[in-house]
Image (cartoon, helix red, strand yellow):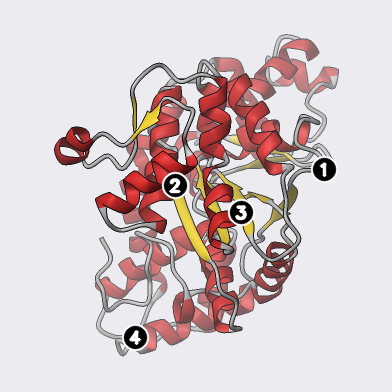
Amino acid sequence: MCTMDTPFIYDKYVTGKNFIGRKKECTAMANLLSSNENLVIFGTPKSGTMSAIQQTFFNMKMTGKHFATCNVNLFNVRSLSAMLLKFGNAVIRSLATTADEYEYIVETHLAGTHFVFDQKRFCDFDEAVSLNWDADANDIFFMLRLPARIAAARGMKIYMVIDEFQTVAGLDDNGQILRSFKEVLSERRNDGTGCTFVITGSCYNAMRSIFHKSPMFRGTIEEFTIPSADEADIVDYMVKGLLQSGKVIEKDAAARIAHQFEGNLWYINHFVSICDSLTKGYITNAIMMDALNTLVSIHDVRFRTSMNNLTLHQISFLQAMLEGVTRFTSADVVRKYKLNSSANVVRVKEALMKKELITFTDNEEAVFLDPLFKYWLTNFYFI
């Protein structure tokens, strides 16, 4: 894990001096949020989405805007009740500090539901809100409206950040949750108070399936994409960061790193921190190769597991991508890569997207979601 004094942070989101580039995107995001636009932010895994969101809030506060933020990560929820309680606990704990305040919020803003403040569960499990019965449709709607109700009562602005939202689609009650969520998103205020949502998730294709391909949320939430930082900003960041510890890297070498990892700052930070640990002075090509091999070895088991879970047709499709194929359903491609049929190609594409290994742009261009996985396939698998 990276240490506290390194500029190359990869174990948590960053803001301030450690946030790289994307100033225009953060400004655009701030303008949308200030206009009470709900946002769904598409980003590939570990591409800096949460850092950009938090940097945007940081910038907004620096301009004198007053608001509260609530953050909830739905990664490990496996049931409707778990999701609602995690959401509620995150909201209440962000806006209150004592047991009496927790109880007041539950009794005031969740009255008429199956949510309660249970003193025993608070003492035993530290729950700010509990359920005394199975959750129903009314419970879902009231809980999702909780931050807006608190904001209205206090005359304040709240930004509700929900991470790993795609988990909702896997719950048994996902239809009711999504319908209630759409209704909540539609209730926007224009007086500078209320709740605005910022939604994101690490499963790129699953998130696009919910918010982009389906018409369900159109008109209630704005789609926003955060690109990688400009190569020049990444190069400058690497050069200056290494200088802090007396290390030197040529700009051309830094540019090659940025290109190799396609601007993915999580990989770049981890890679450069490894380089930093391998030398007391100059970052040579040999050191960079050692660092790359080290990084690959860290992720090798994960990549092997991904490949072990693929069919031969799916593996052949990945090979075709690496070899520059664009017309996957053409007869010669189907024959060369033994893809069986054009109908099977469609099924293979959908399966690989469901596994979050690849995606397709709006122009139907096939893209690997993970640049290191792409490198591993080229140099360690298809050899």
Residue kind at label 3, given as amino acid type:
Cys
Disc 3: which residue:
195
**N-terminal of the two: label 2 or label 4?**
2
For the question of whether residue 321 can be seen, the reply is: no
From what the image shows, is residue 306 above or below residue 238? above
Disc 2: which residue:
72
Q: Nearer the viewer, residue 237 or 324?
A: 237
Q: Residue at x 75, y 64 (%)?
A: 35
- Nearer to us: label 3 or label 1: 3
Q: Residues within 10 Å of mark 2 (few under 14, many from 20)?
A: some
Residue 347 locus on image (x, y percent): 69, 15
For the question of whether residue 128 can be seen, the reply is: yes
Q: How many marks?
A: 4
Disc 1: which residue:
219
Tag shown at residue 308: none
Contact? badges 3 and 1 (CB < 8 Å):
no
Q: Residues within 10 Å of mark 4 (few under 14, many from 20)?
A: some
Question: In the rendered view, does 61 fall on the left or right side of 192?
Answer: left
Residue 289 locus on image (x, y percent): 39, 62
Q: Residues within 10 Å of mark 3 (few under 14, many from 20)?
A: many
Residue 245 locus on image (x, y percent): 30, 86
Residue kind at label 2, given as amino acid type:
Val
Q: Residue at x 68, y 66 (%)?
A: 192
**N-terminal of the two: label 3 or label 2?**
2
| SS class, disc 1 | loop
- Report the Cα–Cα distance between label 3 and label 1: 17 Å
- The answer to which image quadrant residue 346 occupies is top right
- Nearer to us: label 3 or label 2: 3
